[in-house]
Image (cartoon, rainbow, N blue to C red):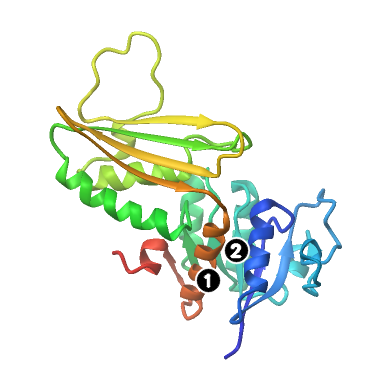
Amino acid sequence: MTALKLAVAGASGRMGRMLIEAIQNADDLTLAGALDTPASPALGIDAGAFLGKAANVVIESDLAKGLASAQLLIDFTRPEGTLKHLEYCAAHGIKMVIGTTGFDQAGKDAIAEAAKKTAILFAPNMSVGVNVTMKLLELAAKSFSHGYDIEIIEAHHRHKVDAPSGTALKMGEVIADALGRKLDDVAVYAREGVTGERDPSSIGFANIRGGDIVGDHTVLFAGIGERIEITHKSSSRVTYAHGSLRAARFLADKQTGLFDMQDVLGLK
């Protein structure tokens, strides 16, 4: 079996290194490219150097060089960087697994348009556990559609730059869809001062940033006389890496189209 040739964006970052290590340990995948920003001190260094074993792939900032041998790019960077990579990949038929969060609607539209030219898997969270949790939330929301207030609480490390997290927003979207609502119409992202009574149709968000929390998400369904909490906690980014490789394998035989982890896990 021919190994699927993968490239990793943000190769010197925490997630990038986790992905590189996971690829190096997979028999059916091979590291074929590594990208980082032009200002990165890691440019020109072997992508596997941090593991103490050469990957024979040099970290590049030039997309043509970094993606010359790649069939698929895994990207967990920032929206502006991902969109540049997206444009190049769409033009050259390189597939993408996108785990970047914080896109505005224009960015999401650009991803959908690029998926007409190449296969893309776009998900705010690549964890298998999180995506199974999404399905549980859909089922719960339908059962708790009346008489229960819905709040989403998320916690992440101090370096995270967007809030609410992409995962929390996706949870909100899943719940709103299950209730026949649009998240934009019912989301409450901040409360301060005299806010009045809670709108029973709203979905509230609360965000915590501190320390080295990898990612905790809890959805609270608060009724009269009972509370139901559905929680997922990540203790390591390795779950995101393994989910991303599963996503890459899913895209191996796809030519075009936009997919998510629900497709990978057969939960739709």
Sequence-wise first label, 2 or 1: 2
Residue 104 visible here:
no
Residue pointed to by mark 2: 74
Which residue is most to the top? 194
At label 2, the amino acid type is Ile
At label 1, the amino acid type is Ala
Q: Is residue 78 above or below residue 224?
A: below
Task: Check disc 1: other Cα within 10 Å, few if <14, some if 14-19, many if 20+.
Answer: many
Query: At x 37% / y 39%, what residue is drawn?
Result: 218
Q: Is residue 153 left or right of residue 21?
A: left
Q: Nearer the viewer, residue 176 or 205?
A: 205
Q: Residue 180's quadrant in the figure? A: top left
Residue pointed to by mark 1: 248
Task: Check disc 2: other Cα within 10 Å, few if <14, some if 14-19, many if 20+.
Answer: many
Q: Is residue 251 above or below residue 227?
A: below
Where residue 67 appears, x then y in whole percent?
70, 70
Q: Is residue 126 above or below residue 26?
A: above
Query: At x 50% / y 63%, what residue is drawn?
Result: 243
Q: Secondary structure at mark 1?
A: helix
Where residue 174 appears, x then y in whole percent?
31, 48
Where residue 206 appears, x then y in whole percent?
41, 29
Q: Residue 268's quadrant in the figure? A: bottom left
Q: Secondary structure at mark 2?
A: strand
